[in-house]
């Protein structure tokens, strides 16, 4: 493949990780109300679900969710190419291949993290995906798996897949232990090795290298961005979503003020009513659960969460969010985070 065939992915200093059962279209719409620029991902969708399942259920999104990447899981080049094309036709900004999921079910299907064993296979898969679409194809992987967890193994993996035309890698800075650990344990027990990701960035200055794993605060994002091109945030995005209200001004140079939490609640109230209740597609709690962490750490935040949890399943009414918000003071509801002074000039 010649250099001119390559599609360059954009650099996004901050993204929210693909998370099964979490980063569904409702959560993404909610997150987009908080940050206009953070790059978003779908949950991982297996090729079989697209080719043989209710495709629309997995692929539809609201136009406001852009920019948005579709994450695919699979181990068959023809299916991945076909699904990439379908994703492109749906309008996704990019197609991402999951090479990091350690779950037993995924391993039995021979995809996810176990593909790190066979860089040539990942190169074959991504080359097929790349030739099917004109949007960038990117990869999310781990720093390794047992037996293939030395920095030179990761170097070899990146070098091999890069030759298939992949120009952005998001690397979860932990190895994945296949068998014996649950996915949740695999996000906690293997130690974080940011230095392995940094070394890849130094070895491949022309690639976009993003780091993922354990990043929870703005200062931690700043720190990791000193040595890599982007940070991907997983659990902190649903535990403390309002963290992202500062991301646009600090890392994307946005001049407009972020929305207050009251404005976000109003938007979500309208979304639930029009997009779910009136359209008859889904249940209010599918979208309302995205909002649970909005007041994390604020006085009244726990009570807000409890009211929502108690009522969103069986006692929903159009003004539920407003009623739950009565637990919070106007100063919390209407506060607008100030844009931080020490924005990193290179990201502005
Ligand atoms: C509930 C949950 C579901 C996840 N699902 C996916 C997934 O579908 N695809 C993927 O690549 N990673 C998935 N992950 C892993 C995250 O993308 C991320 O790599 C991991 O949580 C580490 O980042 P963090 O420490 O910021 O949470 C999932 C994580 C969680 C917590």
Image (tube, rainbow, N blue to C red):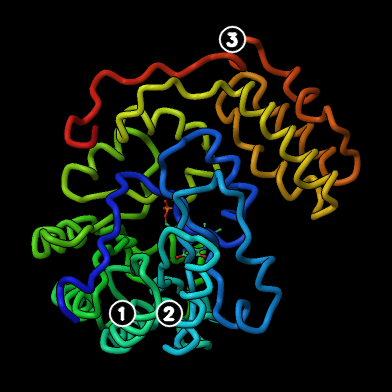
Q: Give me the disc on residue 178.
A: 2
Q: Examine the image and state in which quarter residue 99 appears.
A: bottom left
Looking at the rendered structure, the secondary structure element under dot 2 is loop
Which residue is label 3 attached to? 331
Which residue is label 1 attached to? 146
Quadrant of the frame with the C terminus: top left
Q: Is residue 90 left or right of residue 177?
A: right
Looking at the rendered structure, the secondary structure element under dot 3 is helix
Q: 10 Å neighbourhood of mark 3: few (<14), some, or many (≥20)?
A: few
Can residue 156 be seen in this snapshot? Answer: no
Can residue 220 be seen in this snapshot? Answer: yes
Residue 273 or residue 181, whichever sits in front = 273
Image vertical order of residue 66 relative to residue 2, above or below: above
Q: CA distance from mark 3 to mark 1?
A: 50 Å
Q: Are marks 1 and 2 in contact (CB under 8 Å)?
A: yes
Q: List x then y, in percent, for residue 138.
A: 34, 67
Image vertical order of residue 7 relative to residue 64, above or below: below
Image vertical order of residue 334 relative to residue 220, above or below: above
Which residue is drawn at the image coordinates 62% and 23% (left, top)?
A: 263
């Amino acid at each position: 493949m010649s250099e001119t065939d390559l599609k360059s992915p954009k650099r996004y200093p901050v993204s929210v990780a693909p998370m099964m059962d979490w980063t569904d279209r409702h959560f993404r719409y909610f997150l987009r109300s908080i940050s206009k620029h953070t790059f978003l991902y779908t949950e991982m969708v297996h090729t079989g679900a697209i080719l043989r399942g209710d495709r629309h259920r997995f692929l539809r999104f609201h136009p406001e969710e852009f920019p948005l990447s579709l994450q695919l899981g699979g181990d068959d080049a023809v299916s991945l190419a076909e699904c990439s094309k379908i994703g492109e036709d749906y309008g996704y900004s990019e197609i991402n291949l999951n090479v990091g999921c350690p779950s037993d079910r995924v391993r039995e299907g021979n995809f996810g993290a176990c593909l790190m064993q066979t860089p040539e296979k990942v190169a074959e898969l991504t080359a097929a995906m790349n030739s099917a679409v004109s949007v960038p194809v990117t990869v999310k992987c781990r720093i390794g798996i047992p037996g293939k967890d030395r920095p030179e193994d990761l170097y070899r993996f990146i070098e091999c897949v890069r030759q298939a035309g992949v120009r952005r890698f998001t690397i979860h800075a932990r190895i994945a232990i296949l068998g014996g650990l649950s996915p949740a344990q695999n996000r906690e027990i293997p130690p974080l090795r940011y230095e392995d990701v940094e070394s890849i960035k130094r070895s491949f200055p022309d690639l976009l290298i993003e780091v993922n794993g354990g990043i929870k605060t703005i200062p931690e994002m700043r720190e990791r961005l000193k040595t890599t091109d982007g940070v991907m945030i997983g659990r902190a995005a649903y535990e403390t979503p309002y963290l992202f209200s500062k991301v646009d001004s600090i890392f994307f140079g946005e001049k407009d003020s972020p929305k207050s939490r009251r404005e976000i609640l109003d938007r979500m109230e309208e979304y639930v009513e029009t997009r779910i209740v009136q359209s008859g597609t889904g249940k209010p709690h599918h979208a309302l659960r995205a909002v649970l962490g909005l007041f994390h750490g604020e006085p009244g935040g726990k009570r807000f969460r409890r009211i929502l949890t108690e009522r969103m399943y069986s006692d929903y009414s159009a003004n539920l969010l407003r009623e739950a918000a009565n637990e919070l003071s106007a100063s919390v509801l209407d506060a607008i985070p100030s844009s931080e002074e020490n924005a990193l000039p290179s990201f502005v």
